[in-house]
Image: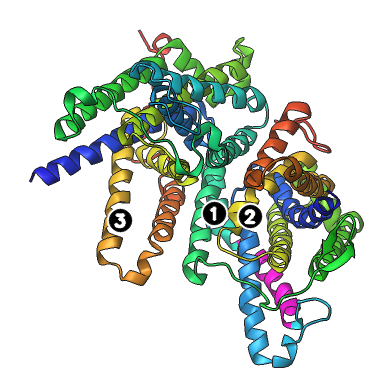
Amino acid sequence: MIGLISYLVFFTTIAAILSIAVLGLNLHWGNTGLFNGGVVAFFGAGAYGTLILGGTPQSGHLGGYELPYLIALTGGMVIAGFMAWAVGILTLRLRHDYLAIATFGVAVAFENLMRNATGLAGGATGIRGFERPLRSALGDGFTYNVLFLIFVLILLAATYLFLERLIRSPFGRMLRAIREDEVAAQSLGKSPSRVRLTAFITGSVIMGLAGGLYGTFYAFISPQDVLPILTFQIWAMLIVGGAGNNKGAIMGAFLIWAAWTASGWALSRFAPLDVQLYTGSIQFVLIGSVIVGMLLWRPQGLFPEKLVVSQAARPK
Amino acid sequence: MIQHLVDGVLVGSILSLGAIGLTLAMHMLRFANFSHAELLSIGAYAALVFDGLFAALYPLLATKIEPLSLTWALTLALLISMALTGASAVVIDRLIFRRVRAKGGELSMVFASFGVAMVLRNIIGLTFGLQSQLYSKDIVMALVLSRDPLLLIKPDQVFSLIAALAIMAILHLILSRTTFGYALKAVAENPNLAQVSGVNLNRMIVLIWIIGGGLAAAAGVFYGLSNQINPVLGRDLVLPIFAATIVGGIGSIYGAVLGGFLVGIASNIALVILPSGYSPAVPFLIILLVLLIRPTGLFGEERT
């Protein structure tokens, strides 16, 4: 029984962390119409940033500044935001699909850099030796995991409330206006490229937060954690949940993560040994089919975006 | 240095073939097709299957065309693979892209293309296994063109380069001399006006997929001749091919050709300075550089 509960805690922690990343993507794609093909790069920047800033000194690579945890986590988010700024400023004024190509490139380059630059981030072996916050007081056991889950859930709720407020604010209306009709928004004196850049950076910072929490949870990060498949999983979560709907995004994250772990478990439990080598391939086909299938048969997702009438237009 | 340059030209010809199809589809259908590089894998594996089939049916065909490792069977298989890959590109469009196009925006197509790429790549992996395969297990000695500086080149690579250039020359003649070529230019210029003038848009789209698929198949086979073929071939080539189209300017066929060679050469020369582990990131640096200096690429037009 305790095993089941502690597994549920583990599962919920990861699903909640991924939900935060999906919320960030929802701001990009759902609310602003920006295509981020490299979610994992911003997620990874947050994770690496947090672990490098907050870790214990390591020989052979940068890091070990032992900053207080919350400062390290914020530092990781800032790094993710800075990366988004650099990519955004180059691509957001161009054709829409340039952003897709450039962000996809960022993800490839980021993974490549982390794998090769041993002096920067430990190379292929990743970063170890991170002291999880309050570990000396709480120990490593079940209590710690439950408290960490609560911490993650609080941050998830905070992100959710922040985004809900944001999209109901004048800024959110502007985002939707630009997404729906750029020329019309421009004619009202809005600057689409600047608004897009703000939204792009904000969403990426949220992805950085998710990455930072992920790194904290495992107290370890390596190039294996920042492979492109994570981007696709996060997309599938958003598309299944419903782009533009924050509740849907969180539901999608839990649903897809449950399906992913369940399919992995079923394949390792029931598939013959020679098929197990191909477990990854089978799961990738599944996630690819989910993305394509949703786009074909239910592009609005399971929980579609609620159309809102802005206050001024509401009949008195 | 000179070796890097030569290698770059050889890789460049493969990237060019891939980029031509990608730039056409990106221009006409207005979406970045991340599954285009998977057509190279389809082509490479289709040729592998037919090569084995022909060699088994007519052992005579399995003789090598000296001094290449290429056999007559593989040459035939290449042609069949080009046709088949073109056809599968049309089928993929019918089944998925056309339906998504009818439903939603251009960016939904980009999403769909990622999904398609993942499904195709892993189905290939499940069918043919994850290990690398070779068209010929014989070792072909590289020719020593010069000893100082050392310059090695394989006969297969020379063949690939010449064949790629020949294919591009044929394409150039088709585009500049036939009604189809004019129609294509007209559609690229202004789809509505072209339709009013009697160009059948849907037929043009089918033709573009056939051309793109055929060229991609040739690129895949040439890549397999000088390297190995494996299921992640598409994943490894997608970024360099995108870099080639962006360098050349989206929509420009000649730009794509030039872009392919430039990216090939630049990626190889970069290895003089950078450790070889960084080579997958080089195309990204090229993309950033182009976006910084000249976002429309060499021959691209400004368009939103």
Which quarter of the picture shows residue B298? top right
* A180 or A236: nearer the viewer: A236
Inter-mark Cα distance, 1 to 3: 21 Å
For badge 1, the amino acid type reads: Ala
Q: Tell me the residue at 58%/53% (across/down).
A: B235
As for residue B88 lying within the magenta part, the answer is yes
Q: Which residues are magenta?
A: B73-90
Judging by the rendered image, the residue that carries numbered circle 2 is B37
**Main SS category, magenta section:** helix
Left or right placement of residue A142 versus residue A68 in this view: left
Q: Which mark is residue B117?
A: 1
* A287 or A66: nearer the viewer: A66
For badge 2, the amino acid type reads: Ala
For badge 3, the amino acid type reads: Ser
Judging by the rendered image, the residue that carries numbered circle 3 is A263
**In the image, residue B295 lies at what x, y percent?**
75, 30
